[in-house]
Image (spheres, rainbow, N blue to C red):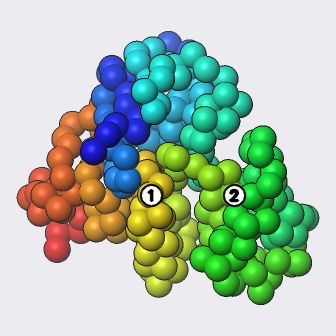
């Protein structure tokens, strides 16, 4: 397995407060890696730094190249992609136009229609609703649209910020099934979640973030049986 993405001793500050402190993690090619942790642990901050929306100290390597000082545009062009927590769809625009916007960073336009067809195959619900305004979709459909739009950029590493947030349990299961199927397509995934159980059931490897620091890490199948994590995050099952 080769390394897709890594952070080494990454620190991110808001004014002088360190929201993320000396975090090191890595995602191997074709892996789903999850970062779990409570509210305010620094999970969103970590992803914002990875995509370049927040400045950070430390080292960040994507596909063998140092991206730590690169602009967001350059990172996106290298096929690093973030689906933010708020999903940030264009409510007044149609499903189809939201999807097409996802491909704007691709220089080569020749494959856009094929990619759109692949996204519609993966999400038949979006195909049915392609002319509907994004703002009229249900919560689950919006998350599917956000995932579909990210896929339009042909990501090598897809970073997802709490894709299960605000969704009913059945829909959460569907979203995580979809995420697992993306790995089967060869997309590497960095998944930030408060829903620790669903995230660990889907992921290959996990990191636990508390107050800005990694306090534990390991194969997801081991973390899910860890007594401390069961008490703290996994609902005691
Ligand atoms: P949640 O799951 O609630 O989104 P999180 O793990 O994603 O939490 P962050 O949103 O990354 O956590 O926040 C980490 C810390 O940084 C928190 O203490 C938060 O209050 C602080 N923080 C976040 N954004 C800012 C900001 N723009 N300015 C100052 N502090 C911030």
Q: Residues within 10 Å of mark 1 (few under 14, many from 20)?
A: some
- Give the quarter of the image for residue 232: bottom left
Sequence-first tag of 2 and 1: 2
Q: Is mark 1 within 8 Å of ligand 1?
A: no
At 53% from the left and 23% from the top, the residue drawn is: 67
Q: Is residue 21 visible?
A: no
Looking at the image, residue 42 sits to the left or right of residue 23; the answer is: right
- Which residue is nearer to you in this view: 191 or 81? 81
Going by the picture, which residue comes out furthest to the left? 227
Residue 133 seen in the current view: yes
Q: Is residue 145 above or below residue 31?
A: below
Q: Of residues 141 and 106, which is closer to you in this image?
A: 106
**Residue 32 percent coordinates (x, y):** 36, 55
**110 and 143: which is toward the camera:** 110
Residue under label 1, please give it.
186
Instruction: Report which quarter residue 135 is drawn in.
Output: bottom right
Residue tagged 2: 152
For the C terminus, the image quarter is bottom left
For the point 34% across and 53% down, the residue is: 31
Distance between the alpha carbons at the discs numbered 2 and 1: 15 Å
- Classify residue 162 as left or right of residue 149: left
Q: Secondary structure at mark 2?
A: loop
Residue 193's spot in the image, x, y percent?
Answer: 41, 55
Residue 166 placement (x, y as % from top left): 55, 68
Mark 1 lies on a secondary structure that is: loop
């Amino acid at each position: 397995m080769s390394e897709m993405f890594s952070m080494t001793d990454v620190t991110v500050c808001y004014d002088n407060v360190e929201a993320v402190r000396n975090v090191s993690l890595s995602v191997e090619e074709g892996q789903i890696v999850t970062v779990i942790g409570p509210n305010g642990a620094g999970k969103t901050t970590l992803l914002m730094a990875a995509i370049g929306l927040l400045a950070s100290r430390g080292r960040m390597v994507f596909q063998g190249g140092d991206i730590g000082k690169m602009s967001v545009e350059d990172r996106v062009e290298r096929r690093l992609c973030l689906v933010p927590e708020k999903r940030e769809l264009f409510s007044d625009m149609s499903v189809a136009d939201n999807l097409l916007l996802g491909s704007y960073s691709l220089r080569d336009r020749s494959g856009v229609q094929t990619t759109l067809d692949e996204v519609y195959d993966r999400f038949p619900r979006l195909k049915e609703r392609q002319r509907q305004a994004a703002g009229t979709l249900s919560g689950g459909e919006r998350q599917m649209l956000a995932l579909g739009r990210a896929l339009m950029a042909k990501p090598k590493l897809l970073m997802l910020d709490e894709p299960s947030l605000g969704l009913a349990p059945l829909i959460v299961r569907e979203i995580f099934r979809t995420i697992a199927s993306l790995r089967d397509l060869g997309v590497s995934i960095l998944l930030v979640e408060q829903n620790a159980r669903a995230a660990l059931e889907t992921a290959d490897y996990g990191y636990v973030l508390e107050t800005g620091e990694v306090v534990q890490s390991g194969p997801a199948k081991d973390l899910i049986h860890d007594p401390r994590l069961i008490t703290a995050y996994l609902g005691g099952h």
